[in-house]
Image (tube, coloured by chain):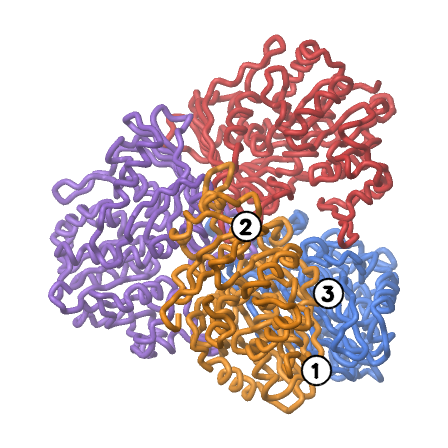
Chain colours: A red, B purple, C orange, D blue
């Protein structure tokens, strides 16, 4: 890319829904070329097309709204637990956390691993990187390599619910200081994937008020991501976060009602201006949106169906920025972000582009 | 009722959805008998059945899940603006607030008016009565009568979103003192009624993050209802409320994620015990639920579809009572209440039963 | 029952959704007493309550809208594959067809088995009984017992989609003769159960136009049920059926658009009269609806949400009976029936009541 | 266009949802330039932007998923009932049928009118044009002009439900001859527009089995469109059509289950081949899809959410082509077509492109 040569990438967990999103996000990528697809043992040896085929009906099970990239359909799948990475520059993993805990370190011994799994997010030497927010935390990669004696490394992206929140909090944190954050999420069913996923029987004409583990993830990850990196270590940000995470009958796009207490006095107009300035800073990378954070002044926005696809699902949209009567200084607002674009594979690809540009990842 | 004679009631706005709910709630009532149905001029003179008939298809437009009470179908409708109340003991109104502002005072000159409209809720001499929460505010009725020189009076019930909130806050306020409340609602489409109502085009696969006027209503009403009555006046409760009110694709039942800062230390178990004690105090009235506030320990509850109909839609269900990491003392929880039962006509009937029992309303 | 003694019943597959519906339908039944609950080996030895408990959250997984019957929560579960039936008079099975094929014959050696599974529906000596439609097919039980040398027998109920169809066709078949039936179904998600069930990701803002095996079942079962029994054999009805079965985002209640060619001339009024006469014939049984077939003249009915619960979900509602311009003689109409009440456990209980009343089932 | 000059177009009813779709479809069009926007008197004199603004919130009410074309926001709206057409070459109307009956003839006196309204569809001298199906019916324009003494003419497009049906029937009609058609539709809520539109209260967890007037429209229009034009008159096709039209909770995309009796023997494979040949005939026009009719072999397709946007919503997708057991010769299948793209404004634009190309419309 820098010099015209492409980086070769592997996608592990390629048959699942997030894996397919990686395939879609990396197809036709200007810097990356898919050279390896892996999944469980039972897919190994099949072509990708065969692995996607429903055994009963013979139909291809392709779940992304992007077209199925024909170029990879004939690639032969590898077994994720016996993966030959010799020809690969980067490993993208879309694994369940349990399996990720076993397999990702194996890959990281030799190669950079960018992951959507939560397995290593809470380890002290592992950065949770968010484009435009804390890319300086990539410094932890040095600590991690040294400590674990790896040639590669692991960098997970955050939980999809954390993603929209931290992007919207970053400019407030920088300009006004955050005292506390209270957040209620209305999350899309796609966040639960397909196995088991969310049944229509459970969510039609209904709200599910509990997503196991989600609130803790958002609370911990937000503080880590907005924390400060010093000498290869991150001190979590010094404020409190309280969440209630619910599931609603929306296909894609998480909505979050956010209440922020700030350290300095601020009014909605200042926060809005600050968000706009932050949102339009250019990230000069192939998958970067024109604006990472969009402020919409229509009081009926953001809405997940109307705003999730702004800039290809890579922007966070904020609206309804208001004074908060409960907090001495502070604001409340609503945000929408696309949980399976910015919040998953495409977000991971954007992080990886940064790691390439800043020299953490190179061709072998 | 006490002595065997029934109270005669009028329902104004009887053809609309809330009016129909009054008809359903009052049909077969042990104390009340529907003796007058009124609506706009264009219904006047028709039978109730004719007024409900769709002009194009001839089908009856009955919107409640309760069966259509055949007993009232042949009553002749009156014009709400020229209503003869001489034979009536109580007027239930289900009017839009604009019209309520004009018509309700006319009725109140001679009769008690129990209303679902917001027109008079914020007047200093008008109590917003909630069963089991602040029935002592009925004292304001004396002030109101004297000041306005009415023989009757107006008592509105609160907004349907306020209703569930204040029922759940009452025991916390009494036992631990409230410092502040932050609340995000996920409201059912039935709350918007039918004209214009909420289009499937707007809410399917979507969340609408703004309900005009709703947040202000909840904030103001909550403080008034939980305020203290002294000498025929109510001082609002001395805490702050901040809301974000959203609409989701749920038919009936508002869900609210609530975060409460308390003045005294409290833990989730104490709050839960306090709510249970409060919830099971008997209201010995025909429309009273067995428990007004139900605590459900299943972490996946309350859910609107599963919990809205508990005790005939007259109970508020609370769950997920947890410590709140943001607040020094305090808890967070989720509640569900039925916006068109407890939060509308049936709630108003329950209030009225109290007013009868405590002597504010008598046969003429 | 006749003489005051209760029949003891076993429910096999009692933890699943249909099994729970059997529990709900049989709790407080005037003739039947649940004396045995069975499921897979992993539930055996647990109480029913323990078996329903979610291992992660400890919450009870009860899926029916009826209240959980406390009386059976402490019963000890048996292993369905090693079931002691000595104290049991009737076995209700709610098994997947694969397992039913193995287990139901074991039970039928000694006891009557009433099943919601399709395993034996298409065997020549097995009647598919529908209340009010073809109870005379119960004669096949004699053939079945003789041929298979069983003391008991197996009587499955039909597929839930067939159920509504045959109830509506029966009066037309009797009075006008059927030449052909074309039917498009819009089926509820509850028909697919919970494992895997229908994902919101698949059915929200969507229609799924294919339900594997469903169209063949409806076509075959309809002809068998409306066939004539002679000497212990059923000749299928002599007409053709063509279906398209689709899934829509409705929780409960299958809607079917039906087009019938008849042998004799008929007009919509005659068909409507015929259906009404048929619908109101009394079935003097505890679970029988007041009307099995209801004709609704509102052109916007039947609708699944409005009509599925008519008479406790045990009635089929028909509307929009119109002349069919394509067919020489014939009509078209729309029906709604409750797929998990009449079309599942409660329908099976009603069939069983008939078998008791007519002497096919007795206490031991 | 042919010679580089653009045709100037007016959009009447431009503020409504179909009018906005015309604006979106015509923005950046290579042949057409929007030079006039008209709506009711109350919009006249405002800019388009002002006319779209919500009076309460000030937010722009733009309902299309396409971006709002900024180029027309500052155009001044005209009053549709006093429209100056002197600079206009083509009038696109998106009016309710009642108003269309009055206004369209006024415009047609001088200009070509292409309409989505049903007002003139059933007049003998008015062709209902469908791209790729019956463009030869445009011959009626000569008859119409002569008879009505108009310089312009009126050509409506069909009802959105007819559109998908006739595209799929055309190859069957041509190759095998049609004896009869039975069709059940599952229609999207967008087909009902926004005033009043379809309430979530009515369609969530529900099916509405009746759309007034729809079945008659589909039956009549299908025969007219597939009829044969001789000497400036159209004889309707000589077969029967029977429909049941229902509304389901789908945002966009009508699904139809179709059963066709043919005159000649045919099997599903032949019909599928015939459809594919028909579908890929090139329409060399700017808005034409690459394939007008797509056959999808996945048995779970077509689905409205997955297939409505194929080729920009301008293709009809067919699947599940099967032998029909009821019909001597014939097939059944399922189709999906986009009711507000091919079935509305974009479909009308495509028809207009044909009329330009074939010389019916020229610059003045």
Along the polypeptide, which appears first: circle 2 or circle 1? 2
Q: Chain of mark 3?
A: D
Q: Is residue A135 visible?
A: yes
Q: Which mark is residue D196?
A: none
> What residue did someone put label 3 on?
D334
**Residue B167 image offset from top left, x and y in percent:** 30, 44
- In the figure, B85 relative to B176: above or below? below
**Crowd band around label 1 with a 10 angstrom C-alpha radius: few (<14), some (14–19), many (20+):** some
Q: Residues under labels 2 and 1: Cα distance?
A: 40 Å
Residue closest to the eye, D213 or C207: C207
Q: Which residue is mark 2?
A: C39
Q: Is residue B240 left or right of residue B196?
A: left
Q: Residue at x 43, y 28 (%)?
A: A330
Question: Which residue extends farthest bottom?
Answer: C265
Describe the element under mark 1 as helix, strand or loop: loop
In the image, residue A93 sits, relative to residue C181, either above or below, namely above
Q: Quadrant of residue C212?
A: bottom right
Q: Residue at x 33, y 36 (%)?
A: B272
The residue lying toward the viewer, choosing from C4 and D126, is C4
- Tell me where residue D35 appears, x and y as whole percent: 70, 57
When the figure is inspected, residue C189 is found, relative to residue A161, above or below; the finding is below
């Amino acid at each position: 890319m820098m010099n015209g040569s492409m980086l070769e990438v592997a996608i592990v967990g390629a048959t699942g829904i997030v894996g397919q999103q990686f395939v879609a996000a990396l197809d036709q990528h200007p810097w990356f070329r898919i050279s390896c697809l892996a999944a469980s043992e039972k897919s190994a040896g099949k072509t990708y097309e065969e692995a996607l085929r429903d055994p009963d009906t013979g139909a291809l099970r392709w779940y992304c709204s992007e077209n199925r990239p024909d170029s990879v359909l004939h690639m032969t799948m590898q077994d994720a637990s016996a993966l030959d990475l010799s020809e690969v520059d980067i490993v993208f993993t879309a694994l369940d956390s349990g399996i990720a805990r076993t397999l990702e370190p194996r890959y990281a011994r030799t190669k950079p691993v960018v992951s959507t799994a939560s397995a290593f997010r809470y380890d002290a030497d592992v950065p949770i990187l968010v484009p435009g927010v804390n890319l300086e935390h990539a410094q932890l990669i040095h600590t991690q390599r040294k400590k674990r004696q790896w040639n590669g490394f692991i960098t997970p992206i955050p939980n999809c619910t954390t993603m929209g929140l931290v992007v919207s909090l970053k400019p407030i944190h920088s300009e006004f200081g955050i005292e506390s954050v209270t957040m209620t999420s209305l999350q899309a069913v796609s966040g639960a994937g397909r196995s088991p996923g969310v049944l229509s029987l459970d969510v039609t004409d209904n709200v599910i008020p509990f997503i196991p583990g989600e609130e803790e993830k958002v609370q911990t990850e937000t503080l880590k991501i907005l924390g400060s990196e010093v000498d290869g270590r991150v001190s979590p940000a010094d404020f409190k976060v309280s969440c209630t995470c619910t599931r609603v009958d929306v296909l894609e796009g998480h909505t979050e009602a956010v209440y922020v207490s700030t350290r300095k006095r601020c009014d909605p107009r200042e926060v809005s201006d600050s968000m706009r300035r932050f949102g339009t800073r250019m990230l000069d990378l192939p998958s970067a949106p024109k604006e990472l954070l969009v402020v919409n002044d229509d009081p009926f926005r953001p809405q997940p169906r109307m705003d999730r696809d702004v800039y290809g699902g890579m922007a966070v949209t904020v609206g309804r920025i208001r004074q908060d009567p409960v907090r001495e200084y502070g604001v409340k607002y609503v945000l929408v972000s696309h949980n399976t674009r910015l919040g998953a594979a495409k977000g991971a690809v954007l992080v990886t582009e940064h790691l390439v540009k800043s020299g953490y990842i190179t061709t072998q």
